Image (cartoon, coloured by chain):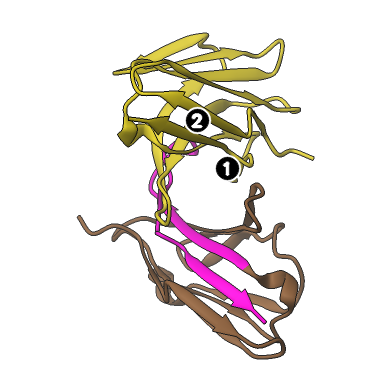
Chain colours: A brown, B yellow
């Protein structure tokens, strides 16, 4: 089966610009998560989708971040306008079934805001 | 904070030696998991231990869990250069949200 894919792998943008990250989960996985890792620190939860519905967006830093999951398939995470502190690696993960089901991660998008 | 904390932050050992990484957390958990991340790649699930278990094995991996001390350890026996990676503990406190720590960077010298 194809794994979780993320696009782009790297993005360099200027402060104030907009960036959209995309995640394609494993087919059939209802649960989709976004995480962020900044400067080698902990991997922080951003939000969780079940199919197309946002179940938990408690980790979204502010209203400059908008996540969508059209039709319960792929997801996008838009940052608008980007700030310097948004730099980091954004990971997407998907899972199916129980709470304890392992997460399957994509390789991440490295975002650099200059 | 609900984040897990791994210790040490970095570990360098010779091939063939054992590597031990520790994780501490502050809340009650349902289960604890360990993940590995190779540089530039996504995290890969290694093993899960439930809150009512004390020890679990998988190949060269041994995980222990002490809920009274709110801590877990991951032991990799007979390490190999291919084990070089970052290792993260992760846990659930109730819902679907998986909480990760900052990881331990392991370097195994050939």
- View extreme (right): residue: B1
In which chain is the residue bearing label 1? B
Q: Are marks 1 and 2 in contact (CB under 8 Å)?
A: yes
Residue in view at x 46 percent, y 37 percent? B35
Residue B27 visible in the snapshot: yes
Question: What residue is disc 1 on?
Answer: B98
In front here: A50 or B38?
A: B38
Is-magenta flag for residue A106?
yes
Residue in view at x 70 percent, y 64 percent? A60
Disc with the residue nearer the chain's start (1 vs 2): 2
Residue in view at x 29 percent, y 57 percent? A3
Question: What residue is disc 2 on?
Answer: B33
Counting from the top left corner in percent of width and height, residue A41 is at 66, 49
Q: From this view, report whether residue B89 is shown above or below residue A13.
A: above
| Span highlighted in magenta in the image | A88-114
Q: Secondary structure at mark 2?
A: strand
Counting from the top left corner in percent of width and height, residue A62 is at 77, 71
Compared across the picture, whether B81 is left or right of B63 comes to left
């Amino acid at each position: 089966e194809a794994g979780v894919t993320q696009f782009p792998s790297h993005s360099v943008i200027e402060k104030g610009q907009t960036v959209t990250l995309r995640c394609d989960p494993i087919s059939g996985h209802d649960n989709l998560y976004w995480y962020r890792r900044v400067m080698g620190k902990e991997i922080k939860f951003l939000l969780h989708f079940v199919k197309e519905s946002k179940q938990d967006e408690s980790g979204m830093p502010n209203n400059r971040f908008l996540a969508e999951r059209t039709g319960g398939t792929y997801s996008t995470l838009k940052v608008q306008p980007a700030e310097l502190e948004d730099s980091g690696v954004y990971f997407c993960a998907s899972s199916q079934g129980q709470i304890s089901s392992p997460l399957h991660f994509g390789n991440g998008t490295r975002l650099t805001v200059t | 904070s609900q984040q897990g904390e791994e210790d040490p932050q970095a570990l360098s050992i010779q091939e063939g030696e054992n590597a031990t990484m520790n994780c501490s957390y502050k809340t009650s958990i349902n289960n604890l998991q360990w993940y590995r991340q190779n540089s530039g790649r996504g995290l890969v699930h290694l093993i899960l231990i439930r809150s009512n278990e004390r020890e679990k094995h998988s190949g060269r991996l041994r995980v222990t869990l002490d809920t009274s001390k709110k801590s877990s350890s991951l032991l990799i026996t007979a390490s190999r250069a291919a084990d070089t990676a970052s290792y993260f503990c992760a846990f659930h406190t109730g819902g679907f949200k998986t909480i990760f720590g900052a990881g331990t960077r392991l370097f195994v010298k050939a």
